[in-house]
C-alpha cells in the first residue's frame, strides 16, 4: 500500500475512527468528573480533624482505597471490574459505565492526593477566619479553602486529566456495547481497521497518535485559559 | 464601669496545654458589655492563645468559659485526674513509710466519684457546645494579625458572605450594610476590588468591617497592627478607637501601648500563663506593681 492508498483508506473509514474517538473521550471525561468528586471527598476526609470515631473509620477506608488503587495497574483494575465487580453492568445493552466507573474510581485516588496537597497549601488562617465568622468546617472548606486549593492544583489536575485521557486506550481489552451493538474506542477501532486491510496497520496507529496529540494540545490550551482567567480574578 | 448585668464573656481558671507546655495556667476575667480590654505581655506569654481560646479556635484543656450566659466550655476533669494521681502516690508513700493511709484512701474515693460526675457533666457540655459553637461564633467577631481576607473574593463578597450564608440576609440588604460599614472606614470605593489590590492597613480595615457585618457582641483583636508598616498603624487604630467609642465590647491583644493607654478602659498583663496585673490604664502605666510588669514596661516604653 502506498501512502496515497493509506490516506484514502483512512478517509473512507473516518466516521468509524471518529466514533472511536468519541467513545474514548466520553469515557475519559465522565471519569474525570467522577474522579474529581471522589478526590474532593477523600481529600476532605484526610484533612478533617480526627475528632470522632466515624471520621477515623472513613480516614482508614480512604487510606486503604488510595493504597489499593495506586498500588495496582489500571488495566488490572479494569479487568477485575469487568470480570468480577460490575458483572451486571457489563451484561447490559450499553455497558460503557463499566470503563467509566473503573477509570473514575482510579482517577479519584490520584485526584485525592492532588487536592489534599492543594488544601494543605492554603494558609490555615483562611480556615480560622471562616470558622471565626461562624461558618461550619465543611462550609468553610467548600466556600473558602477548596476554591483557593483548586487554583493551586490546576496544573497538576490537568496533568492527571491528560494521563487519564491517554490511559483510556487500555479499554480496548474489554468488549464494549452501545444499545447492543459492539463498539470500540479509538485505539481498538484503529487496530481492527488496520488489520482488516494488509499494509494499513501503521497508518492507522499514526492516525491514533495524531488524534491523541491534538486532544492533549487542546487540553493544554484550556488549562492555559483557565489559569489566565483565575489570575485576572486575583489582581 | 461596674454594673449589675451579666458579663459578655466570663472566664474561670482557663488552662491550655500544648503537650507538656503549659501555656495558660489559670486565667480569670469577666468582660462586661462596653469593656475595651487591652491584653499585653511579653511574646510567648500566652496572650494570643488566651484570645483564641475565647472563641474556641484553640480548645482549652481546663477551666470554664461562659458567653452571654451560656457555657461554651467547661472542663475540670483533667485537674481531678492529676489530683487522683498525686493522691495515689501519697498513698504508696504512706504505705511504705507509715502515714494516714485510711484518710488518703477516703480522699481518693471522693476524688474518683467527683471525676465520674465531672466526666458525665462535661461530656454533655462539650456535646452541646459543639452543636452551638458556630452560632456563638457569629456573635464573637475576630480580627487577625494577618488579616485573613479571602483572596478569591471581592471586598464586597468578603463582607457579605457570612451575613448572607449564616443569617440568610438578602443580597441587596447585605450589600447595603457592607457599603454603609465600608463608608465608615473610608473604603466604600474599593468594594469591587480584590484584597490583593489593597494595602495592609486597608486590608485590616476591611477585616474589621467583615466581622462588624455579623453585628457581634464582642470583637477579639489578635495583634491587629503587628503585621503593618508603621505608617499604616494609625489608620487601623483610628478605626478601632472609633469602634470603642461607639460602645463595642473589645478584647485587644496589642503591642500598641498608646492604644492601651488612650482607648482601653482595662489593661491586663499576662505573663507565665496567668494575669499578673489588671488595672485601669492610668494606674496601670503610672504605678505598675508586679515586678515583671515593671520590667516589661521599662523595655517597651
Image: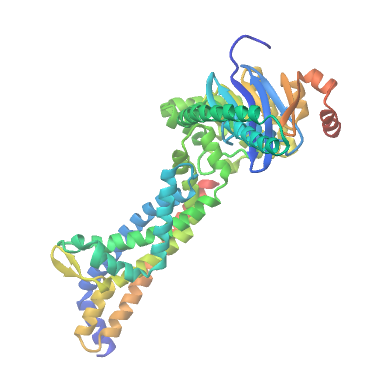
**Residue B224 drawn above or below residue A220:** above
| Front-most of residues A32 and B241 | A32
User: Residue at coordinates 46% horizontally, 36% vertically from top-left?
Assistant: A136
Quarter containing the C terminus of chain B: top right
Q: How many marks?
A: 0
Which image quadrant is residue A181 in? bottom left
| Front-most of residues A230 and B67 | B67
Residue A233 in the image, given as x and y percentages of width and height: 50, 47
Quarter containing the N terminus of chain B: top right
User: Residue at coordinates 45% horizontally, 42% vertically from top-left?
Assistant: A52
Residue A153 in the image, given as x and y percentages of width and height: 49, 56
> For this view, does A30 lie left or right of residue B66?
left
Residue A203 in the image, given as x and y percentages of width and height: 29, 83
Residue B120 in the image, given as x and y percentages of width and height: 48, 29
Residue A230 in view, yes or no: no
User: Residue at coordinates 33% horizontally, 71% vertically from top-left?
Assistant: A75
Residue A47 in view, yes or no: yes
Quick one: which residue is furthest to the bottom in this view? A1
**Residue B107 drawn above or below residue A28:** above
Quick one: which residue is furthest to the left in this view? A180
**Residue B249 drawn above or below residue B155:** above
User: Residue at coordinates 24% horizontally, 60% vertically from top-left?
Assistant: A97
Amino acid at each position: 500500500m502506498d501512502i496515497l492508498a493509506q490516506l484514502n483508506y483512512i478517509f473512507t473509514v473516518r466516521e468509524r475512527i471518529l466514533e472511536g474517538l468519541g467513545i474514548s473521550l466520553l469515557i475519559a471525561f465522565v471519569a474525570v468528573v467522577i474522579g474529581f468528586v471522589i478526590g474532593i471527598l477523600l481529600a476532605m476526609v484526610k484533612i478533617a480533624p480526627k475528632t470522632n470515631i466515624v471520621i477515623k473509620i472513613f480516614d482508614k477506608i480512604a487510606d486503604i482505597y488510595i493504597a489499593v488503587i495506586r498500588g495496582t495497574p489500571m488495566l488490572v483494575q479494569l479487568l477485575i471490574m469487568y470480570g468480577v465487580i460490575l458483572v451486571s453492568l457489563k451484561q447490559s445493552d450499553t455497558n460503557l459505565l463499566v470503563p467509566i466507573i473503573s477509570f473514575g474510581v482510579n482517577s479519584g485516588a490520584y485526584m485525592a492526593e492532588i487536592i489534599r496537597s492543594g488544601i494543605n497549601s492554603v494558609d490555615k488562617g483562611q480556615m480560622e477566619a471562616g470558622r471565626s465568622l461562624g461558618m461550619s468546617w465543611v462550609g468553610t472548606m467548600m466556600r473558602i479553602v477548596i476554591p483557593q486549593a483548586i487554583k493551586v492544583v490546576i496544573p497538576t489536575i490537568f496533568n492527571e486529566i491528560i494521563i487519564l485521557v491517554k490511559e483510556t486506550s487500555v479499554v480496548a481489552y474489554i468488549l464494549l456495547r452501545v444499545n447492543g451493538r459492539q463498539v470500540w474506542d479509538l485505539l481498538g477501532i484503529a487496530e481492527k481497521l488496520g488489520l482488516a486491510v494488509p499494509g494499513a496497520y501503521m497508518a492507522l496507529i499514526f492516525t491514533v497518535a495524531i488524534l491523541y496529540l491534538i486532544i492533549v494540545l487542546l487540553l493544554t490550551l484550556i488549562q492555559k485559559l483557565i489559569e489566565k482567567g483565575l489570575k485576572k480574578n486575583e489582581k | 464601669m461596674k454594673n449589675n448585668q451579666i458579663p459578655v464573656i466570663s472566664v474561670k481558671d482557663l488552662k491550655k496545654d500544648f503537650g507538656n507546655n503549659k501555656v495558660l495556667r489559670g486565667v480569670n476575667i469577666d468582660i462586661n458589655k462596653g469593656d475595651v480590654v487591652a491584653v499585653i505581655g511579653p511574646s510567648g506569654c500566652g496572650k494570643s492563645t488566651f484570645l483564641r481560646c475565647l472563641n474556641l479556635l484553640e480548645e482549652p484543656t481546663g477551666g470554664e468559659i461562659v458567653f452571654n450566659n451560656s457555657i461554651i466550655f467547661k472542663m475540670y476533669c483533667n485537674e481531678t485526674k492529676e489530683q487522683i494521681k498525686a493522691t495515689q502516690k501519697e498513698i504508696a508513700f504512706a504505705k511504705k513509710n507509715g502515714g494516714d493511709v485510711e484518710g488518703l484512701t477516703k480522699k481518693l474515693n471522693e476524688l474518683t466519684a467527683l471525676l465520674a460526675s465531672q466526666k458525665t457533666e462535661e461530656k454533655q457540655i462539650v456535646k452541646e457546645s459543639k452543636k452551638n459553637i458556630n452560632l456563638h461564633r457569629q456573635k464573637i467577631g475576630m480580627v487577625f494579625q494577618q488579616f485573613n481576607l479571602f483572596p478569591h473574593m471581592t471586598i464586597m463578597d468578603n463582607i457579605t458572605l457570612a451575613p448572607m450564608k449564616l443569617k440568610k440576609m438578602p443580597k441587596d440588604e447585605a450589600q447595603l450594610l457592607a457599603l454603609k460599614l465600608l463608608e465608615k472606614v473610608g473604603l466604600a470605593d474599593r468594594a469591587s476590588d480584590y484584597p490583593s489590590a489593597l494595602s495592609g492597613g486597608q486590608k485590616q480595615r476591611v477585616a474589621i468591617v467583615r466581622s462588624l457585618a455579623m453585628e457581634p457582641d464582642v470583637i477579639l483583636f489578635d495583634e491587629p497592627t503587628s503585621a503593618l508598616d508603621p505608617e499604616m498603624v494609625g489608620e487601623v487604630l483610628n478605626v478601632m478607637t472609633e469602634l470603642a467609642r461607639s460602645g463595642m465590647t473589645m478584647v485587644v491583644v496589642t503591642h500598641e501601648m498608646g492604644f492601651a493607654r488612650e482607648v482601653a478602659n482595662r489593661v491586663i498583663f499576662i505573663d507565665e500563663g496567668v494575669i499578673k496585673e489588671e488595672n485601669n490604664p492610668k494606674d496601670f502605666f503610672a504605678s505598675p506593681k508586679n515586678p515583671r510588669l515593671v520590667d516589661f514596661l521599662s523595655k517597651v516604653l
